[in-house]
Amino acid sequence: MHAHTFEYPPINTLKPVAEDVWIVDGPIIRFGPRWLQMPFSTRMTIVRTGNGSLFIHSPTPLVPDLKAAVSALGAPRWIVGPNRIHYSWIPDWHAAYADADVYLAPRIKEQAKERIDFATKELGGASGYPWDDEIATLPVSGSYMTEFEFFHRRSRTLILTDLIENFEPKKMQGWWMRWLTRLGGVQDPDGKMPRDMRFTFRGREAELRRAVETMIAWKPVRIILAHGRWYQDNAEAELRRAFRNVLND
């Protein structure tokens, strides 16, 4: 298994998505129990607000060329860890941009331990954030973790993390990965919420359905995902497809 086949080159490079929205495709990480570690592609989203402040979502490694490119866009003001497993490179960004506020989803600090030993703010409800005027915030609470989804109103860009994963079979080598991603419900063209994550919403289906209905009501144009192929268009249809079981219950 050559993990690099999962990548979306060029990596560590700013890629424009819409006006004032960029992604950066990062390196492959391995995640899961030691005996079954899967390769995951990584992706950061950057949104620039009207006053030039940058909203940094799920940061990838801050290599020198990327740092220079980001600094040319504006000043990173908010560095966001959207769920408990998306924090690996936040310390590096905090070290580089000490004036930026770091916002963390619940349980990141206990998971990161001494790696995050600096002052942070907690993501909590759906409002009360300095970006509220331009970016909507939506908490989605499961028993294992709460993930925060974001919607850039002006470009109608929906930013998810692990709520949908969408791995492309053509980027996998070997039947094993294709079988695993299909079993997990995260294989393109029918990428959905990972099966193990779905278990954490048992008993919370109504809340999850309300969250999905909120996202559909926003009428997004595109959906950026952290892992796999993201959706450049047909966003509402992709939400209805990925959450068809939730919506039809």
Image: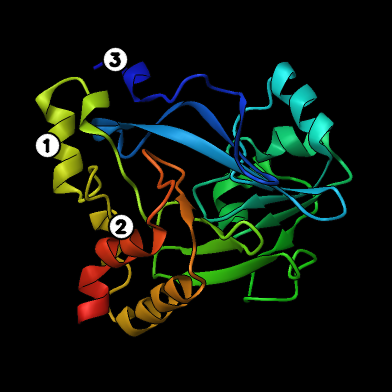
* Residue ID for mark 2: 193
- In the figure, residue 166 lies in which quadrant? top left
Compare marks 3 and 1 and give the one earlier in the sequence: 3
Question: Do callouts 2 and 1 mark residues in contact (Cβ within 8 Å)?
Answer: no
Q: Quadrant of the C terminus?
A: bottom left
Q: CA distance from mark 3 to mark 1?
A: 16 Å
Where is residue 202 shown, x and y percent of the image?
27, 75
Q: Amino acid at mark 3?
A: His
Compare marks 2 and 3 and give the one earlier in the sequence: 3
User: Who's the residue at 53% across and 62% down the image?
Assistant: 149
Numbered circle sitting on residue 179: 1
Where is residue 46 shown, x and y percent of the image?
66, 44
Question: Do callouts 2 and 3 mark residues in contact (Cβ within 8 Å)?
Answer: no
Q: Residues within 10 Å of mark 3 (few under 14, many from 20)?
A: few
Question: Could you tell me if residue 82 is visible in this image?
Answer: yes
Where is residue 185 shown, x and y percent of the image?
20, 51
